[in-house]
Amino acid sequence: MTTGALSLRTLPTLLTDCVLVGHAKKADVVFTPRQWFAMCAHMMNENPANFFLMPYRDKNGTAKFAKAFKAKSPASIGFYPTNSQRRSRWAAMDFDMHDDDQMRARDLALKAFSVLYRQPQLCVALTASAGDPVHSGWHLFIFTAEFFPCDEWTRLLRQVADQIGAPVKSGVCEIFPDECRGIGRGIRAPGTWNPKSDECGLILHETFSAFLHAELSVTSKEGNASLSVRCNTREGDQITPSSELFRGEHGEWVPAFAITAPRSRHAKLEALVGTAFFQVSMKVARQNAERQFHEATPAPAATLSEHLAEFNDLWAGMERIWRKKLYAAEREKINSLATDNNREAFRITRNWSQADSPDFRIVCASLANRLGVTLKTASNIRRHFCSLGILRKTAEYVPHKFSARYEWTANREAKRKQGALISPQWNGDPGDARLK
């Protein structure tokens, strides 16, 4: 899925799948429990555990919607399309029928669905906000694998609203996120209980479960004991970032790429991307670029959106050049990986393997920080790469002394044909294997 700017792509107008209003289904019919919880984890946007919307009824039976602080019963759940970096990997449109114009809400929702459904870079879920798909408002959710600035989401939703002739205003069409600069408004998750009507929303059509299919293909505990099968690398385990943004091994990226003079912004950004590409995930690099912009003195003439658009272009250019230099076997391996975290880890660990020593260390804590994931996720990725023949362990981890060491085997056959294959054997040199 693309990591470029959000935009509507010009596509043929023929809709290849239709939506029958009478075929709306409850969430537990459409999603498996694991799929639904994975969707909720995706909508959390890597926010703290208590950062979600809680729809409930007060003691008088009045519907309330508030940010969660303590549990209430009964209650529903919703989410905010933003995080501390004002970024999100989902958005939504709410088509209301507050003036009882049922046909208008339905027609606008279906038109918006028709526009967004045909965008291959997006996944969608069209839902009724209550249990009756005819006498109900409509929610349209849009999902991406990557994070995008909230401003880009708002612009995209306004483009859709303008294209279908829907005024963005309360009672007709509301968008999430909107232009609010704070926490903004949340919206209930697809298929959840509506305290206003005492009914659960219904799902009319969705493509999000297909997006999750590969990430939710997880083996049993017994299977995970063998390196010959897939380990647990589902996206739900990979969305929690480490506590501190990686800005160089010792924070050296901050002064090295600081914007401290007029007309130096682009050159500093280019230098940052050139270094970060081989060392961190795109997500972490983009966060570095955002920090770079906000910390600039004097303030750049360009906007943050322009800065990040240049970042996307520079990163895409690096990616094209890098992929051309891969062995065919390596391209086959990376193309087979199901998640962005795995693909980013492939690039980072391959870079680590480019050393004089035939094997190299992989410190899970360092890999986790560079990917912006948990220690467990980094460990799972490392083990998963061994099961796929990308890595081979050559030395075990020795607590507080030596890191585990690995051989890069994704291009083993190509090297063998070139007569360059040397079987790595760790020589026990503590200086070569010390922890970072």
Image (tube, rainbow, N blue to C red):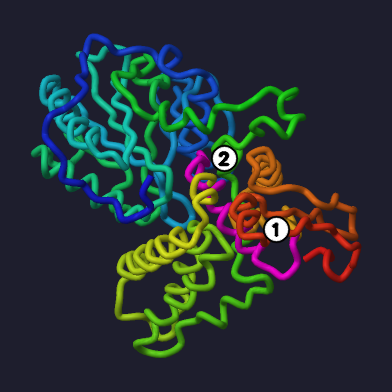
In the image, the segment drawn in magenta is 334-359
Question: Does residue 91 show up magenta in the picture?
Answer: no
Q: Which quadrant would residue 4 be assigned to in this image?
A: bottom left
Do the residues bearing badges 1 and 2 touch, measured as CB atoms within 8 Å? no
Which residue lies most toward the top here? 22
- Residue type at mark 1 is Leu
Q: Quadrant of the C terminus?
A: bottom right
Helix, strand or loop at disc 1?
Answer: loop
Judged left or right of residue 239, residue 365 is: right
Residue 203 image offset from top left, x and y in percent: 33, 19
Judged left or right of residue 32, residue 134 is: left
Badge number at residue 205? none
Helix, strand or loop at disc 2?
Answer: loop
In this figure, which residue is indicated by the disc labeled 1? 421
- Residue type at mark 2 is Asn
Query: Looking at the image, can residue 345 be seen?
Result: no
**Pointer 1: residues within 10 angstroms few (<14), some, or many (20+)?**
some
Q: Quadrant of the N terminus?
A: top left
Q: Residue at image x 71%, y 25%?
A: 223
Q: Which quadrant would residue 226 be assigned to in this image?
A: top right
Q: What is the spatial separation of the Cα atoms under label 1 and label 2, in whole angstroms?
A: 52 Å
In this figure, which residue is indicated by the disc labeled 2? 50
Q: Residue at image x 50%, y 58%?
A: 326
Query: Looking at the image, can residue 182 be seen?
Result: yes
* 113 and 185: which is toward the camera: 113
Judged left or right of residue 128, residue 326 is: right
Q: Residue at image x 35%, y 28%?
A: 207
Residue 350 image offset from top left, x and y in percent: 61, 58
